[in-house]
Image: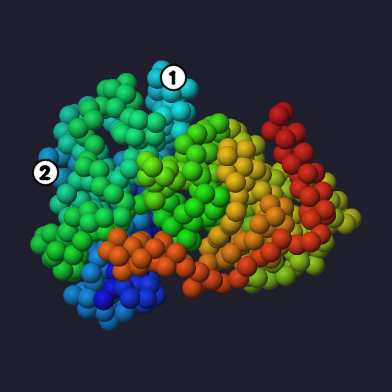
Amino acid sequence: MYYIGYDLGSSSVKAALIESSTGKSVGITQFPETEMAIIAEQAGWAEQDPNLWWKNICKVTQKLLEQTGVSSEKVKGIGIAYQMHGLVVVDKNQEVLRPSIIWCDSRAVEIGDDAFKGVGEDKCVSNLLNSPGNFTLSKLKWVKENQPEIFEKVDKLLLPGDFIALKLTGEATTTISGLSEGIMWDFKQNKPADWLFDYLGIPTDLIPTIVPTFSNQGTVTKKASEEIGLPAGIPVLYRAGDQPNNALSLNAFHPGEIAATGGTSGVVYAITDSSKTKESSRINNFAHVNYATEAPRIGKLLCINGAGIQYSWMKQNVVASKDSYNDMNNLASSVSVGSDGLRILPFGNGAERMLNSKNTGASIFNLNFNKHNKSHLLRASLEGIAFSFVYGIDILKNDGVDLSAIRAGNDNLFRSEIFSNTIATLVDTDINIIDTTGAVGAARAAGVSTGDFKSFDEAFSDNEHVMTYNPLKDKKIYSEAYEIWKQDLENQYNN
């Protein structure tokens, strides 16, 4: 028997099948092959059609079953991961009323900021652990103000993963973790933030039924079965946003554990047991997948926009077109720690929240035309991105994270010894590289719900462990290089 896991992104849908007895992946695929379109009718807007998500879920399911040769009758449960913070609104007939306002849409910034001040910053920080900001509830307020004829028809407010569960089961449900990512969960009162709904003029009966993250959240209807090709009656057993789910996939559940990713942007997601924050303007706090009132597990998420995109820029503009990332890493390794004084700030991909939403741009310091070449640029690029991760981890430590472990996916940045050794040495913590995906994690999580896996450790053990980067003994040269880089950053930031 098998579990199927979905990871609904804004570019594609990934799906994975795992064996229910072993947790081993038997197949992973995605659809479509080209990126899904994002509708941007105005600057700063970003929308997608939820019904297209559902069609692609159906198509990726058929593709995966055909690719693996697994009969749909052998699928015993479903797990769902999804792009966070999006807004989907449906009417009483469960029909979508407008395109989803997705995570990267910025139209509701002013609404969220006004609510932060109007309700009271202290209350928001202590009860929500965040500012209402540009999150899901603020986006619904935008609909109320700008499209009242649509708002009047809204029966339920859904996140992207809630919508997929609705299409599968016919039931409108959500989770505590999901409500917290939409900045709708009151951690102090342990219930939806009705006072924020009241302030924004949004009725709380738009909130779907709340179900546990790991549970039977409804079963596949006959109608859904005909569309997706899975048996009617199999349960949806798990649901979480992509970053909490990524941490789950990397076996990060306990206070002090960090799940990191190094894609176009970088993410550091740290687990803590403290329902407090003093860095709400620089990090986001969400209920982790294993959050419970009696044992709170909060995921503190810090995003670095200027990460892999800078190294990608180097690949496109500095090295030869035939050079791979591995070739670039080899060139960079010919230069010593500190890049012979060359330093790069990688923040050239928009405003950085960890810099209090300043858009400083990327900068190069101390470039010497008689000494530095492309190898220096590559090493300084990797070091600059690594230093930004260390800077972010320091912010998390300042917010109560007692770092004990770092786990990361097997992506381009973390495959670089320079990048990973720099972080491991400066934060004095091993980095374990795990080869997994969000879709595999969601499928395994479904097995946790049924008891096929007795514990998180059993389900998400390091059986796909690729390697470990250990802190190097000569920390001094790394620390000296980092302190100079940090001085550059803070000088620029304060100007």
SS for callout 2: loop
Query: Is residue 185 found left or right of 375 in the rendered image?
Result: left
Q: Residue at x 72, y 35 (%)?
A: 490
Residue 204's place in the image compared with 270, above or below, is above
Camera-nearest residue between 17 and 450: 450
The type of residue carrying mark 1 is: Gly
Camera-nearest label, 1 or 2: 1
Quadrant where the C terminus sits is top right
The colour scheme is: rainbow
Residue occupying the point 62% across, 61% down: 431
Q: CA distance from mark 1 to mark 2?
A: 37 Å
Q: How far across and down, in percent of the image, does residue 91 sit?
A: 15, 39
Q: Is residue 53 left or right of residue 439?
A: left
Q: Position of residue 353 (x, y in %)?
A: 55, 37
Mark sitting earlier along the chain (1/2): 2
Q: For mark 1, what is the residue?
A: 120
Tell me which amino acid carries mark 2. Answer: Asn
Residue 461 at x, y percent in the picture: 47, 68
What's the residue at 28%, 22% (across, down)? 198
Q: Could you tell whether 441 is left or right of 99 in the image?
A: right
Determine whether the residue tagged by mark 1 lies in a helix, strand or loop.
Answer: loop
Instruction: Indicate left or right for 250 with 351 as reference.
Output: left
> Is residue 329 depicted above or below 254 in this figure?
below
Q: Name the image quarter holding residue 303.
A: top right
Specify the label residue 93 is tagged with.
2
